[in-house]
Image (cartoon, rainbow, N blue to C red):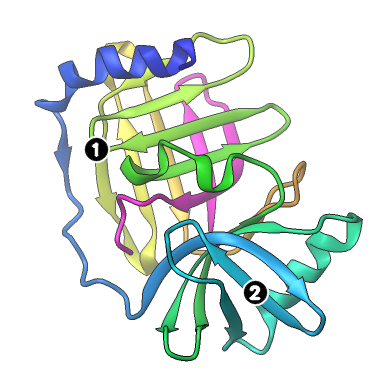
Amino acid sequence: MTAARALLLVLLPLFAGCQSLFHAEAPAPAGDRLQGMLTRQGDAWQLQPCSQLPALRLRDTKDGELLELASALMADGQTQLFADVRGALDLQQATLTVNRLYRLQGEGPGCNDTNFPRLILRASGNEPGWSLMITGDGLLLERPGEPALALPYLEEQLPEGQLAFTSEANRQRLQLWVTPQRCQDSASGAVTHLSAQLRLDDGKVLRGCAYYGGARND
C-alpha cells in the first residue's frame, strides 16, 4: 500500500460523518457491466471477463466504434487491452453485445485493481500530472511533488449529465467537474467515457479524463 492510500484510510473515516451528497441514486442502466481483457481472434474480438465467466465474443452496437478504438490502440503492437463495458450478456451464445464503453486501455492494473469495487470515480490528467480518486468515504488528490490531499466532498448533479465534486475542508478548496464526453488520455492513449476539469484554490484549472468505478451504478 502506498503512503498516499494509507493516508486516505486513516483520514477519510473521520470525514465520512460530515459528507453530504446531492446525488440521488439513478435507476441501473440496461445490461450487465463487465471488465476483462480484450483480444482479437482473426476478424472476431473476444473478452475474457475478470470474473469467472467464460470468454465472450464481443458484438458492437455502435457502428463498430468500440472495435475501431481497440484496433487503433493495438496498432503499436499490443496484443490485449483492458476493457470496461456494459451490454447484453448471452451466456448460451457466449456473446456480449456492447452498448456502452466506460474504459479501454493498454496500461494499468486491469483486473488486478483492488480499489475498483469501492471506487466511485477516478479522474487524471497530464502536463502537469494529477490523479483524483473518489470513494464513499472521501476524495484523494495526488500530484507529483505535492503532498497528497485526503478530503471530504459534496456531490452535485448538474444539467446534461454533468457532476460536480466540491471540497472546502482544511482551508483547501477544489472542485472537479465531469462531463459525459469521450476522452482520450494524451500520454497513455486510454479512452474513457467522461472528460474532467479540476479547479484548485490557487486558480489553476487542470484537464483530463475520468471514469466511473465499480461503486457507481450509472
Quadrant placement of the C terminus: bottom left
Comparing 89 with 74, the one in front is 89
Amino acid marked by disc 1: Gly
- The residue at 60%/80% (across/down) is 58
| Magenta-colored span | 191-218
Mark 2 surroundings within 10 Å by alpha-carbon count, few (fewer than 14), some (14 through 19), many (20 or more): many
Comparing 106 with 127, the one in front is 106
Q: Is residue 28 above or below residue 120?
A: below
Please, which residue is most extreme toward the left here?
17
Query: Which SS class for mark 1?
Result: loop
Is label 2 in contact with label 1 (beta carbons under 8 Å)?
Answer: no
Left or right, 51 with reference to 19: right
Disc on res. 46: 2
In the figure, residue 24 lies in which quadrant?
bottom left
Left or right, 36 with reference to 148: right
Amino acid marked by disc 2: Gln
Left or right, 192 with reference to 188: left
Comparing 96 with 217, the one in front is 96
Locate residue 188, reporting x and y percent: 75, 44
Locate residue 7, reporting x and y percent: 36, 12
Q: Is residue 192 above or below residue 168?
A: below
The residue carrying mark 1 is 136
Disc on res. 10: none
Does the stretch in magenta take in 157?
no
Mark 1 surroundings within 10 Å by alpha-carbon count, few (fewer than 14), some (14 through 19), many (20 or more): some
- The residue at 69%/77% (across/down) is 45
- The residue at 49%/56% (across/down) is 50
